[in-house]
Image: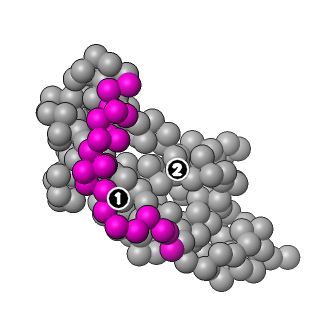
Amino acid sequence: MHKDGFWDVIESVRSAAAEADDPLDEGLAKHLANGTRQEVLEYAERFDELHAALYRWDVWAAAYLIGGGCSDDSFMDFRAGVIALGREWYERVDAAPDSLAGHPAVLQAVDARDRSEVLFCEAVNYVAAGAFERITGDADAFYEAWHSFRGVNAGGDDSVDMGEDFDFDDYNEMCRRLPRLALLFLGEST
């Protein structure tokens, strides 16, 4: 599955899920389960590629501000949430994580007591496994197939360049790197 095909799936399911007021992860799993095992594995490959591309300190800092903190596990969920926003927002965030300051869900979350659900979509991480289980009836079948698929399709270097590390609790640093999000969630320095 090419990136365009991946994004077509995300966008079409997002639209249908919004109209039916259904969870996106369920819609994605149903949609993928109508395809082949190979298509599910190819979807998972694209998802992982896009997910890994957001594994950067600047994106993590945005998640930290929006969520009022962000653990390793939560950062996985946040990146899945950014993918779930669709191609346009994914590309905005990839280019400039501070652009999330303009997303309606983020703006609504500014005064929320619990911001841990804003853009943090854990279930989206497991869509491929859920679709594979629907096809095979076996909860473990995806992971066995994925291991075999990745063995055949594994490519190159797995090292990650997360960019420059910085202190998420340093007010001035956060304001310098993510000025719009810092203003929303940290306010003005007194």
Name the residue at 65% across, 75% down.
165
Q: Nearer the viewer, residue 165 or 118?
A: 165
Q: CA distance from mark 2 to mark 1?
A: 13 Å
Q: Position of residue 89 (x, y in %)?
A: 37, 62
Residue 147, above or below 101:
above
- Let me know if residue 150 appears in the view: yes
Name the residue at 66% across, 51% down.
71
Q: Position of residue 188 (x, y in %)?
A: 75, 74
Residue 163, above or below 72:
below
Question: Magenta segment: does it hold 144?
Answer: yes
Question: Magenta segment: does it hold 13?
Answer: no
Q: Nearer the viewer, residue 165 or 27?
A: 165
* Nearer the camera: disc 2 or disc 1: 1
The residue identified by callout 1 is 49
Q: Dot 2: within a 10 Å radius of its alpha carbon, few (fewer than 14), some, or many (20 or more) residues?
A: many
User: Residue most toward the right?
Assistant: 190
Q: How is the image coloured?
A: one colour
Q: What is the magenta range?
A: 140-161
Q: Nearer the viewer, residue 3 or 147?
A: 147
Residue 107, above or below 166:
above
Q: Position of residue 65 (x, y in %)?
A: 65, 61
User: Residue most toward the bottom?
Assistant: 176
Q: Position of residue 14 (x, y in %)?
A: 28, 43
Image-quadrant location for residue 16: top left
- Let me know if residue 179 appears in the view: no
The reply to whether dot 2 and dot 1 touch (C-beta < 8 Å) is no
Q: Secondary structure at mark 1?
A: helix
Judged left or right of residue 117, residue 2 is left
Q: Secondary structure at mark 2?
A: helix
The residue identified by callout 2 is 76
The quadrant of the rendering that contains the C terminus is: bottom right
User: Residue most toward the top?
Assistant: 137
